[in-house]
Each structure stands twice: as structure tokens, then as C-alpha cells.
């Protein structure tokens, strides 16, 4: 058997199992053997990292199956789609996966002949081309707005940039061991290298404090929103935009008669409100 390779980026896409879950998996593998094959791409594990680790530790026989993909980005998309379908992910993990999917898909589209990173060309029955953006397409796939997908892309970019400085800090963010809002991550995505290094270092040594723990301006000291002004308070503007996105998503689902899809839309709206609440809480 060829040497099996562990790719750190692929491995970090998999949520870390807690001690109890890992112990249950270990016990099952010891008693029943490895019932599911380790999935490989070019001898790199793309599914089954925990099973491989436990089987190697206890000399448990296992089988492998290889999948063919045209590029690394195709592999990333496959891993992400598999994890989203298989696991109950936290809001930060969902944002990260959707953002990673968007960034990988955008790179693939950019490399297709006659395409660019902003859209894809499809043909109607009349033969006329119609452009559909990657964000719109993935928004429909994940049942969120295209704006949410674009915001998630910034979250993913920030987490990956932090990971380049400190893989341990990246793990803590994705595992939920550190509290950092998606808004803070989006700001880091367009921040300086020093900003990223500072946050990564603080997360790594457990000195990072989320903004919700900082003493910031409270709503009582803010100017009330006057509909006649051209520039409302930034937090009010964010709330209005979030509400508008939620409203538009509900209208879209109503038109599509997709009542079963309301739950993730409502959950995302609640998560966005929580992010906003964290910013204005002392």
C-alpha cells in the first residue's frame, strides 16, 4: 500500500471530535473493526482522518478507496459538501464552509475558458447566454442569500489567514474554544498583517477577548435613528440590512413553496442578530 498522506488543510476542514465522541469511535473500531474505507485522493486522506489515526494506533486493518478529482479546489468542495450534509455544524463552521466553497468555486470558474471569477454562463433554450453569479448559485444551494455567501467568503479568508500564522488559533476558532464574532473576522479579512498576527497570537496564548467582553458604547448613548437623515447609525443600518435580507429570503421561499427550507433561513437570521447584540452588549 502506498504511503498515506495527511494534508493539514484538508484535516482542519473536519470538526474536531470531543473526547467522549472520539472514545466511542475508538471503542467501536476496536470491537467491530473499520467498517468504512478511508477515502483518498492522490494518496491524501480526504475522509476518515479519525478512523485512520485510531486504526494506525491499534493496528486495526482498514481498506481505502480512491476518488478522482481534477484539482485541489474540487477536492475542497467535495469535503465541504460531505461535511455540511453529514454533521450538525456550529454557525461559525457553517460560515467557514460556505465561504471556503465560494472561494474554491470562484477559482474554478475563473479558470474555465470564457469565464471569470464573477459569473458563469448558462444557455437558455433559445440559445442566449445568461450569467449567474457564483454567490447566487451557492446561496440557493445553502438556502441563504448571495450577500451571506459573500460575507462568509471574508470569514473564511480571515480564518485561513489566521491559520497561516497559527494553525492552533485556527483550530480554536473552528472548534468554538475561542469566541470571536463573524463581524470581527470579516474586518480582519481586510485588515493589516499586523492585525491578523496580533489576533492569532492572543488566541494561541488564550489572552484574546471577544468584543462582547469589552466595554463599548451602549445603545442608550447612541443617536436615535431619524428616517429623514441620509446616514443612520451604523448598527441600525446593519440591523436594517440584515432584516431586509431575511425578508427577501422569506419571500423567495414563499414563491418557491419551499416551507421545509424556512428553518435554516430563520436560524441564520437569529445568528446574525446575536452577532449584532454582542457588539452592543457591555
Image: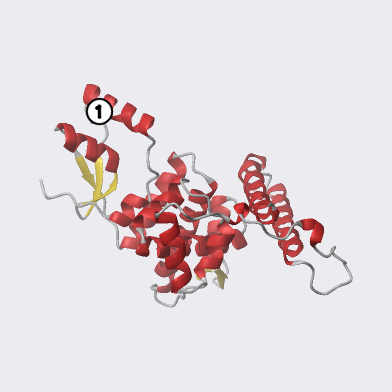
Residue drawn at point x = 28 percent, y = 43 percent: 49
Please state which of residues 224 and 107 is positioned toward the viewer in this rendering: 224
Q: Look at the image and tell me whether residue 144 can be seen.
A: no
> What x and y, as percent, mark residue 43?
19, 52
Please state which of residues 171 and 214 is positioned toward the viewer in this rendering: 214
Residue drawn at point x = 49 percent, y = 59 percent: 99
Q: Which residue sits furthest top? A: 31
In this picture, residue 164 sits left or right of residue 266: left
- Residue pointed to by mark 1: 29
In this picture, residue 31 sits left or right of residue 224: left
Above-or-below relation of 160 to 270: below
Residue drawn at point x = 67 percent, y = 45 percent: 266
> What x and y, as percent, mark residue 241?
72, 61
> What x and y, as percent, mark residue 77?
40, 56
Residue 260 quadrant: top right
Residue drawn at point x = 38 percent, y = 60 percent: 163
Residue 62 quadrant: top left
* Quarter in which the N terminus is drawn: top left
Above-or-below relation of 54 to 234: above
Label 1 sits on a secondary structure element that is helix
Please state which of residues 257 and 165 is positioned toward the viewer in this rendering: 165
In this picture, residue 190 sits left or right of residue 248: left
Above-or-below relation of 33 to 80: above
Q: Look at the image and tell me whether residue 193 can be seen.
A: yes
> What x and y, as percent, mark residue 153?
51, 63
Amino acid at each position: 500500500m502506498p504511503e498515506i498522506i495527511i494534508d493539514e488543510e484538508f484535516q482542519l476542514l473536519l470538526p474536531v471530535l470531543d473526547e467522549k465522541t472520539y472514545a466511542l469511535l475508538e471503542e467501536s473500531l476496536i470491537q467491530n473493526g473499520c467498517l468504512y474505507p478511508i477515502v483518498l485522493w492522490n494518496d491524501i486522506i480526504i475522509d476518515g482522518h479519525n478512523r485512520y489515526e485510531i486504526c494506525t494506533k491499534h493496528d486495526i486493518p482498514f481498506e481505502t478507496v480512491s476518488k478522482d478529482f481534477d484539482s485541489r479546489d474540487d477536492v475542497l468542495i467535495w469535503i465541504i459538501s460531505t461535511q455540511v450534509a453529514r454533521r450538525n455544524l456550529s454557525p461559525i463552521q457553517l460560515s467557514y464552509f460556505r465561504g471556503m466553497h465560494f472561494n474554491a468555486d470562484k477559482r474554478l470558474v475563473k479558470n474555465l475558458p470564457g469565464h471569470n471569477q464573477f459569473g458563469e454562463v448558462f444557455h437558455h433554450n433559445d440559445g442566449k447566454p445568461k450569467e449567474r453569479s457564483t454567490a447566487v448559485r451557492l446561496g440557493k444551494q445553502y438556502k441563504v442569500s448571495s450577500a451571506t455567501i459573500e460575507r462568509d467568503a471574508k470569514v473564511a479568508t480571515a480564518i485561513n489567514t489566521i491559520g497561516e500564522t497559527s494553525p492552533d488559533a485556527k483550530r480554536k476558532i473552528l472548534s468554538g474554544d475561542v469566541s470571536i464574532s463573524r463581524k470581527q473576522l470579516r474586518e480582519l479579512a481586510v485588515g493589516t498583517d499586523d492585525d491578523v498576527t496580533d489576533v492569532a497570537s492572543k488566541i494561541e496564548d488564550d489572552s484574546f477577548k471577544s468584543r462582547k467582553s469589552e466595554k463599548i458604547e451602549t445603545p442608550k448613548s447612541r443617536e436615535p435613528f431619524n428616517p429623514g437623515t441620509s446616514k443612520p447609525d451604523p448598527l441600525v443600518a446593519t440591523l436594517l440590512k440584515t432584516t431586509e435580507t431575511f425578508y427577501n429570503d422569506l419571500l423567495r421561499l414563499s414563491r418557491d413553496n419551499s416551507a421545509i427550507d424556512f428553518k435554516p433561513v430563520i436560524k441564520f437570521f437569529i445568528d446574525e442578530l446575536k452577532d449584532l447584540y454582542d457588539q452592543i452588549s457591555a
